[in-house]
């Protein structure tokens, strides 16, 4: 596996960085990895590396770049507060905002073949929006997408297969919201875990190794199914 960075250009001309992990052999497809509210930090780079180790070209775009460059936060309360502010700033951009950066990453990943998108926390929300609004995506996997279960997001319709992971102890995403999302989207595969928000991240206290391993196994199988067709 080889890792480096590159600069992508969005439709409006914005140039922004992305972390890239390349597999050792010919890629079996591309995966766009969408960050949490903590930037393209060590955890997100490790996630991208993990997909590269499975044979995918993995690209993790900096989705904070439009409001602040070089963001790489940890998981302290101060980091959380900083990340929440940055997310709010990006969410406040005029449409299409950061989605054009996600589209640029999808376009770049397409050099490897069919493209899937996976996102965590805020990135999970962006992965859901990408599945509903962007082109060239064969499958999307949001992990505990904060805000995905609000009425405005539930009203969207995905253009590709979606597998959504949620924790049943997630204080940020109420269970009734997940149930409403599930009821509105019979075609979306929803998986619940006995875990908290952020259960996939081994840098956080909420890390749940059992849930993370099962979600990863399901995610890899989902991508194998939809990207190899």
Image (spheres, helix red, strand yellow):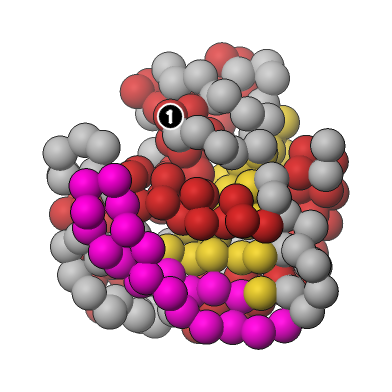
- In screen coordinates, is 11 left or right of 44? left
Looking at the picture, how far across and down is residue 163, in whole percent? 68, 38
Q: Residues within 10 Å of mark 1 (few under 14, many from 20)?
A: some
Is 13 one of the magenta-colored residues?
Answer: yes
- What secondary structure is the stretch in magenta mostly built from? strand
**Mark 1 sits on what residue?**
133
- In screen coordinates, is 130 left or right of 189? left
**Looking at the picture, does residue 69 appear above or below residue 131?**
below
The front one of 112 and 71 is 112
**Looking at the picture, does residue 150 appear above or below residue 58?**
above
The span shown in magenta is 1-21
Rendered residue at 48%/74% (across/down): 19
Rendered residue at 61%/56% (across/down): 111
Circle 1 — which element?
helix
Q: Is residue 14 among what the camera can see?
A: yes
Looking at the picture, how far across and down is residue 112, in whole percent? 67, 57
Q: Quadrant of residue 56?
A: bottom right
**Looking at the picture, does residue 77 appear above or below residue 169?**
below
Which quadrant, please, contains the N terminus? bottom right
Which quadrant, please, contains the C terminus? top right
Q: Quadrant of residue 45?
A: bottom right
Q: Quadrant of residue 192?
A: top right
Rendered residue at 66%/65% (across/down): 57
Looking at the picture, how far across and down is residue 12, in whole percent? 21, 47
Rendered residue at 32%/58% (across/down): 9
Is 177 one of the magenta-colored residues?
Answer: no
The front one of 8 and 18 is 8
The front one of 50 and 30 is 30
Q: Is residue 77 among what the camera can see?
A: no
Looking at the picture, how far across and down is residue 32, in whole percent? 55, 56
């Amino acid at each position: 596996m080889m890792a480096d960075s590159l600069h992508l250009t969005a439709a409006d001309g914005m140039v922004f960085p992305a972390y890239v992990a390349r597999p050792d052999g010919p890629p079996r497809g591309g995966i766009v990895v969408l960050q949490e509210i903590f930037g393209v930090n060590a955890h997100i780079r490790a996630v991208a590396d993990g997909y590269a180790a499975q044979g995918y070209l993995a690209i993790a775009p900096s989705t904070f770049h439009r409001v602040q460059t070089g963001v790489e936060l940890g998981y302290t309360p101060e980091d959380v507060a900083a990340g929440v502010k940055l997310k709010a700033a990006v969410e406040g951009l005029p449409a299409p905002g950061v989605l054009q950066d996600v589209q640029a990453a999808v376009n770049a990943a397409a050099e490897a073949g069919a493209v899937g998108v996976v996102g965590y926390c805020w990135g999970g929300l962006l992965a859901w929006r990408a599945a509903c609004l962007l082109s060239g995506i064969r499958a999307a996997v949001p992990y505990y997408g904060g805000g995905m279960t609000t009425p405005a997001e539930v009203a969207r319709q995905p253009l590709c297969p979606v597998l959504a992971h949620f924790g049943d102890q997630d204080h940020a995403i109420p269970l009734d919201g997940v149930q409403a999302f599930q009821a509105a989207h019979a075609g979306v595969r929803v998986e619940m875990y006995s875990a908290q928000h952020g259960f996939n991240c081994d840098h956080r206290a909420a890390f749940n190794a059992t849930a993370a391993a099962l979600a990863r196994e399901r995610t890899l199988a989902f991508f194998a199914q939809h990207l190899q067709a």
